[in-house]
Image: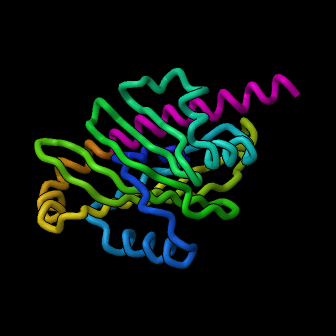
Amino acid sequence: MFITILIILVSAFTILPLYSAPVQSERVQDIVDNSTITRIQKPLAVRTDRETLEYFIAHVEELTKHGKDFKKKDLILEVKRNGHYGIQMPSKHITGEFALAEQQPQKAVYLGHGSATVFFNFSGAIVLKIDYTTLRDEAGSYEEVNTSVYLKFDNAFLGFIAKAASPLLNPKLDKLITKFATKTKKVVEAAYENKKRTK
């Protein structure tokens, strides 16, 4: 889900100053086309309605308010100006900013920029794409969420090293994305169940 949005926050990074829509679109496309690392996650079934899912996509800060699974050492979100969010993942030494760059029916795109420290300091941009479709099975309807993460390092040499280390780096990144996706799924599903009870 956007879920990983956060995750995305994944290794999250800070959105550059607000661009106009066409410039922001070009920036997103450049990161996607020239990413150092691309991770496409398996579809995730989220037992919720579209309204609840889209609420959390547009209000990322609600994840940490509703989710006791998100501990301060794992994720700190701060609402900034003009729809931007500050993000810190203290246990991973990651800081940055991100914002919702695009939202259409069944699709959301986040753009961010930030820095991390893993043996050395590095920075880069991130794009998180979330696509979702309403499906139905024997248990009822749910949202199938597909998440893609694109990371582009600011430093080409460090990007080259990261690509060379991808057999070691990618499984760790996938594990981080899956961890946050699972926590986000729990928060969204719990909010949906609560909404049904209070109707």
In this figure, which colouring scheme has been used for the structure?
Answer: rainbow
The answer to whether residue 137 is visible is no
Query: Number of numbered discs present?
Result: 0
Q: Residue furthest right?
A: 199
Residue under the point 20% across and 43% down: 117
For the C terminus, the image quarter is top right
Residue under the point 17% across and 68% down: 156
Q: Which of the 4 image quarters holds residue 138?
A: top right
What stretch of residues is rendered in magenta?
174-199
- Would residue 173 be found to the left or right of residue 101 on screen? left
63 is within the stretch colored magenta: no
Above or below, comparing residue 182 to residue 67 in the picture = below
- Would residue 42 be found to the left or right of residue 47 on screen? left
Q: Nearer the viewer, residue 125 or 193?
A: 125
Q: Which of the 4 image quarters holds residue 125?
A: bottom left
- Would residue 57 be found to the left or right of residue 168 on screen? right
Q: Main secondary structure of the magenta part?
A: helix
The answer to whether residue 186 is visible is yes
Above or below, comparing residue 50 to residue 102 in the picture = above
Residue under the point 64% across and 49% down: 58
Residue 57 lies, in percent from the top left, at: 61, 48
- Would residue 133 be found to the left or right of residue 162 on screen? right
187 is within the stretch colored magenta: yes
Above or below, comparing residue 55 to residue 187 in the picture = below
Residue 53 lies, in percent from the top left, at: 67, 44
Above or below, comparing residue 125 to residue 175 in the picture = below
Residue 163 lies, in percent from the top left, at: 18, 61
Residue under the point 39% across and 69% down: 32
